[in-house]
Image: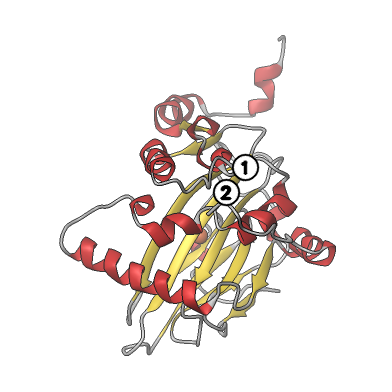
Amino acid sequence: MSAEPAAAGLSAQQTENFQRDGYLILEGFLTPEYNERLIAEVDELMADRANGGKPLLTSYREMGLLTSHPPMMAMIESLMGPRFAMHHIHSVRHDAGHSGVAWHQDYEQEPHTNRSHVMVHVFYYLNGLNGEIGDLLVLPGSQTIVVERSLSLFGTEDLPGSVCVDRLPPGSAVIVHSAVWHARRPKPGGEERGRYFIDISYCQHGVLWPAYGTVKEVNQEALRQGFDRGGRYRHVYDSSRFFDRRPLKQRFDRNNEGSLLLRLKDR
Ligand SMILES: [Fe+2]
């Protein structure tokens, strides 16, 4: 795992496009061989879940290796600089009849007041998109608008200027600024062909990010399995970059009234 050639990262044009639009489509990003291994592993995961298991995704080799996939790490470095940490990995197979997800954004902050540091979600569409089961909707440029997470009043309708991504070849990846508004529009069809989806999120160093209960376990398992590739990507699994939002959130909600700016008065 150590003698991999240095990956190139994003071109200046791609970086500029990402900064303007808040997303970047990488068609056929994964090699067919790796992609096939990932698809087989997502099937294995779905079977494990059907049997009542709740396994850590970093206990699966191929998905675990994807969290530090060197070509993607180089691209994330183009957007964030050399230091960032994984927020989560989610994997699932969406089968026919999937209900979709209404408009929302996924930037982690409590409360939402700025976008000072970069957080991204990388959406991997292992068997592409073909207009069945669910399309990706994205609103270019919306990553600069500071809003709370849910925009569910818009459902999965088109918004002015929104883009519908419904055709992607297998192994494609979409790097999405986590604050960009996006949705999954439910579509008929796909009875013969589930939609394989992996979502991995990374947060730029420099601030602490809200996270949930499993970061430590996920990272410990990743390091145990050597997914940091000899230490080259150890920072990706640094749990100290996150804080548990839940206890603070309750206290904050009790005190959240009027203009927070006034709290600086007389300091
Ligand atoms: Fe999302």
Judge whether residue 109 can be spotted in this image. Answer: no
Please report the residue visible at 40 percent of the width from the left and 72 percent of the height from the top. 37
Residues under labels 2 and 1: Cα distance? 6 Å
Question: Where is 224 relative to 13, above or below?
Answer: above
Residue 228 in percent (x, y) is at 51, 45
First in sequence: mark 2 vs mark 1 = 1
Judge whether residue 110 can be spotted in this image. Answer: yes
Question: Where is 164 relative to 92, above or below?
Answer: below
Quarter of the figure that contains the C terminus: top right
Residue 235 in percent (x, y) is at 57, 38
For mark 1, what is the residue?
Answer: 84
Residue 101 in percent (x, y) is at 44, 67
Q: Secondary structure at mark 1?
A: strand
Q: Do labels 2 and 1 touch, CB within 8 Å?
A: yes
Q: Secondary structure at mark 2?
A: strand
- Residue 94 or residue 71, whichever sits in front: 71
Please report the residue visible at 34 percent of the width from the left and 73 percent of the height from the top. 40
Query: What label sits on residue 202 in the rendered view?
Result: 2
Q: Which quadrant of the structure image shows residue 8?
A: bottom right
Q: Is residue 79 left or right of residue 155?
A: right
Q: How many residues crowd around disc 1 within 10 Å: few (fewer than 14), some, or many (20 or more)?
A: many
Question: Where is 44 relative to 253, above or below?
Answer: below
Please report the residue visible at 84 percent of the width from the left and 62 percent of the height from the top. 12
Going by the numbered disc 1, the residue's amino acid type is: Phe
In this view, the residue farthest toward the top is 266
- Residue 108 or residue 222, whichever sits in front: 222
Q: Which quadrant of the structure image shows residue 244?
A: top left
Query: What label sits on residue 133 in the rendered view?
Result: none
Going by the numbered disc 2, the residue's amino acid type is: Tyr
Q: How many marks?
A: 2
Please report the residue visible at 45 percent of the width from the left and 64 percent of the height from the top. 198
In this view, the residue farthest toward the left is 51
